[in-house]
Image (cartoon, rainbow, N blue to C red):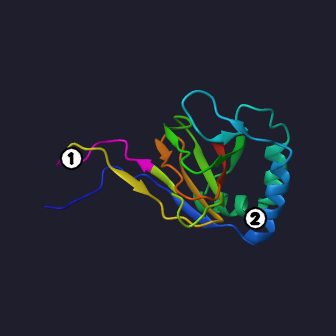
């Protein structure tokens, strides 16, 4: 008998080049795109519902090396139609969600205190033996970029740190 894999879920992780320098530029850039308390049940702050005109272009200039590396790694060209930032204070969390049924989603961990959780991903099918949901957390540190299919459900556990966790997230459509 031969065991094979029918499906797999690709994901990529890269480290931001010259992260400390780019972190300063990105933090300064985000001052022009203030975050507000998210709507409904969420506890975090975001600029997702605000006018973010020009943010994609300015982010792309700062992160051009990483964007090129991502394109080479996934062997596809892509556009970035959406980008936003999210901040999590102590106790803040993000409920399970996905971004789209097509494309990829990127997360840059701009501020990730040691005792703050990275993103948790939900496998789209239950475990075959125990019929339970499977979770995976891609171990990440500040400056890491995680790329996953946009359709994958994911969430952020409560931030246990007294320091703010902050991410920049964006969607990518294959062109």
Residue drawn at point x = 58 percent, y = 67 percent: 141
- Residue 54 picture location, percent across and down: 85, 41
Residue nearest the observer in this picture, 144 or 32 = 32
The residue positioned farthest toward the left in the image shown: 1
Residue 92, compared with residue 68, is above or below; it is above
Q: Does the magenta stretch include residue 26?
A: no
Q: In this view, does 12 lie to the left or right of 55?
A: left
Q: Read off the residue under disc 1.
A: 128
- Residue 111 picture location, percent across and down: 66, 60
Residue 136's quadrant in the figure?
bottom left
Residue nearest the observer in this picture, 19 or 37 = 37
Q: Read off the residue under disc 2.
A: 65
Residue 115, compared with residue 168, is above or below; it is below
Q: In which quarter of the image is the C terminus?
A: top right
Residue drawn at point x = 75 percent, y = 64 percent: 65
Q: In this view, does 72 lie to the left or right of 91?
A: right
Residue range corresponding to the magenta coloring: 121-130
Looking at the image, is mark 1 or mark 2 earlier in the sequence?
Answer: 2
Give the spatial CA distance, label 1 vs label 2: 41 Å
Residue drawn at point x = 78 percent, y = 60 percent: 64
Q: Residues within 10 Å of mark 1 (few under 14, many from 20)?
A: few
Residue nearest the observer in this picture, 117 or 152 = 117
- Residue 11 picture location, percent across and down: 50, 56
């Amino acid at each position: 008998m031969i065991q094979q894999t029918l499906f797999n879920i690709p994901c990529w992780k890269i480290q931001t080049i010259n992260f400390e320098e780019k972190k300063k530029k990105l933090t300064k850039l985000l001052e022009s795109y203030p975050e507000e308390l998210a709507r409904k049940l969420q506890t975090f702050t975001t600029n997702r519902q605000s006018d973010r005109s020009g943010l994609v272009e300015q982010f792309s200039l700062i992160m051009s090396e990483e964007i090129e590396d991502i394109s080479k790694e996934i062997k596809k060209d892509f556009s970035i139609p959406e980008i936003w930032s999210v901040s999590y204070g102590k106790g803040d969390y993000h409920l399970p969600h996905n971004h789209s049924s097509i494309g990829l989603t990127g997360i840059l961990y701009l501020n990730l205190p040691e005792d703050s959780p990275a993103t948790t991903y939900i496998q789209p099918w239950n475990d075959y033996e125990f019929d339970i949901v499977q979770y995976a957390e891609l171990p990440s540190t500040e400056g890491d970029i995680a790329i996953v299919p946009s359709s994958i459900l994911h969430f952020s556990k409560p931030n246990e740190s007294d320091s703010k966790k902050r991410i920049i997230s964006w969607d990518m459509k294959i062109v």
